[in-house]
Image: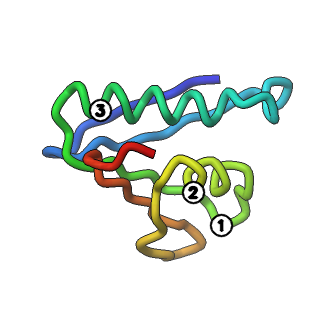
Amino acid sequence: GFARLDKKGKTALISFYLSPTERGKGFGTLTIQSLVKKAREKGFIKAVAKVKKQNIASIKIFEKTGFRKTNIKNNVITYVKSLGERK
């Protein structure tokens, strides 16, 4: 798989992919937690992720790690997390 942290001003853009053989083992949650920690360390004020509506596993991970749904457009959900939050 891969994990990616991109920059757009003071916003961290988060994306990741897990190999099907590694899903369901907690790696997604650990990956997002690590990316959020790294984003905080780099001084970002919020993190944003975009997830396709049919990607239920990723939706669960982002919600579990404290991201909130802010928009749905063209079957893509935008999740946002203030990096002052510690969940």
- Which secondary structure lies at badge 2? helix
Q: Which residue position is annotated with label 2?
A: 63
Chain-order first, disc 3 or disc 2: 3
Query: Which amino acid, by three-letter code, is at mark 3?
Result: Ala
Considering depth in this image, is 83 or 11 the residue closer to the camera? 83
Alpha carbon separation for disc pair 2 and 1: 13 Å
Residue 50 placement (x, y as % from top left): 48, 56
Q: Which mark is residue 53?
A: 1
Q: In the picture provided, is 36 more to the left or to the right than 51? A: left
Tell me how far mark 3 sits from mark 2, CA to CA. Answer: 18 Å
Q: Amino acid at mark 2?
A: Glu
Colour mapping: rainbow
* Left or right: 71 in relation to 30: left
Q: Residue at x 14, y 45 (%)?
A: 9
Report the Cα–Cα distance between label 3 and label 1: 25 Å
Q: Residue at x 54, y 75 (%)?
A: 74
**Mark 2 or mark 1, whichever is nearer to me:** 2
Question: Which residue lies under the disc numbered 3?
Answer: 39
Image: 11 above or below 30: below
Question: Callout 1: few (<14), some (14-19), or many (20+) C-alpha neighbours within 10 Å?
Answer: some
Residue 28 lies, in percent from the top left, at 64, 34
Looking at the rendered image, the disc whose residue lies closer to the viewer, 3 or 1, is 3
Q: Which quarter of the rendering shows the N terminus? A: top right
Which amino acid type is shown beneath numbered disc 1? Lys
Quadrant of the rendered image containing residue 55: bottom right
- In the displayed structure, does residue 24 sit left or right of residue 61? right
